[in-house]
Image (tube, coloured by chain):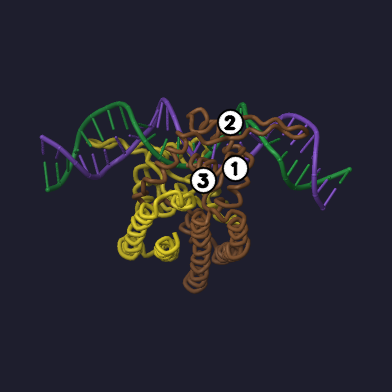
Chain colours: A brown, B yellow, C purple, D green
Amino acid sequence: MLKFALLGFLNYSAMTGYELKQIMDSSTSNFWHAKQSQIYATLKKCESDGLVYSEVEVQDGRPNRRVYTITAAGKADLEAWLAVPFVELEAQKQKLLLKLFFGAALEKDALLTQLRIQKELHQQQIQYYKTQSKEIIARFSAAKPDMEKEAIMWEATRRFGEMFEEMYTQWLTETIVQVEEEL
Amino acid sequence: MLKFALLGFLNYSAMTGYELKQIMDSSTSNFWHAKQSQIYATLKKCESDGLVYSEVEVQDGRPNRRVYTITAAGKADLEAWLAVPFVELEAQKQKLLLKLFFGAALEKDALLTQLRIQKELHQQQIQYYKTQSKEIIARFSAAKPDMEKEAIMWEATRRFGEMFEEMYTQWLTETIVQVEEEL
DNA sequence: CGCACCATGTAATGCGTTACATGATTTT
DNA sequence: AAAATCATGTAACGCATTACATGGTGCG
């Protein structure tokens, strides 16, 4: 899957692995993230599969840059993936729910402390989406007025994050009350 | 992480890998799932780490069963994990958002079709949580009246699923309108 | 007769993280 | 003087999926 994220960005413009890491951190990281090492490894794999090619740019006083460019095969691969709908629900993994599922084994107070820590974190995250995340998109839209359609999609993903965190916070609030009263 | 799910269940009672798969499918699968092969492999690892031990039960006319029992070390490991709070947000991965992020490259109709397919799926999932999932918990609670506290936690995880799917459906509804009007 | 269920596992492969390794330049 | 940034990668390990392999019982 990381492959498609990389191809998606390289389809906008050629970039190095280092730059791909930065752009992912500031845009997709809330729903798709990767470590630098995985990005380098995946780019290498994509190159050997003919989806991208790379050229080394020699710099002086700085490390050389390996700039990756998407190929026709890479574009075709990306477009094919975009075109085929997902016809199943994506399986979720939520560590916190797993712990909570077995959480009756914990002291009531220990459980409440954990839930309150999480509530604090998710509340902060709502603010992140409402401020920083919103601003990143606004700045990008201003810089690239030719990418209006893309900006609408980016805003949709931001809105998902905001709604997710609001739902999560609401659920934690209700669960805390439930545990206080019934456990 | 699967390790803790297995230890959590084995802490209730000794079981085979086959039974663990079944119980996970009917309880935690919405927030933690595993393939049968991974369960067998993880049990083996847990045994070599001394967290569980196994005994083969010979059956006639049926394959032998390898019954796993949690050890004192396994209980300690589980309890330590339960006791330490998660102090960070869990990173999420959402394939659909990744595709949507690059979705401006698609035809408007193709994009709308994909969003509508997803909306249908998530709507069905709301119903699953409101009916089948609710019933499974009710049946289990009736069968194990000594596990009242556990049942409250299970209901909390079910409620998370329901709220998540409602949020997701709401977001898709809004996003579909957005794409219809602005793309 | 065919299918689902019971019950176990191995092997290959892929995806992802952590740790290691290097070193100049720029900013605080 | 220290820390962050720029820039690349490899190696080991762990987690997860897919495919392969076996074979009897019970039900419709």
- Residue A75 point in image, percent of width and height: 46, 38
**Marks 1 and 2, the one that precedes in the sequence:** 1
For the C terminus of chain B, the quadrant is bottom left
Residue C12 picture quarter: top left
Q: Residues within 10 Å of mark 1 (few under 14, many from 20)?
A: many
Residue B139 picture quarter: bottom left
Residue B106 falls left or right of residue A19 = left
- Position of residue A122 relative to residue B105, above or below, is below
- Residue identified by numbered label 3: B74
- Residue identified by numbered label 1: A20
- Residue B24 point in image, percent of width and height: 38, 50
Give the CA distance from mark 3 to mark 1.
42 Å
Of D21 and A106, nearer the camera is D21
- Residue A104 point in image, percent of width and height: 48, 61
- Position of residue A182 relative to residue D20, above or below, is below
For the residue marked with disc 2, what is the amino acid? Ser
Query: Label 2 is found on which chain of the structure?
Result: A
For the residue marked with disc 3, what is the amino acid? Gly
Same chain for labels 1 and 2? Say yes or no: yes
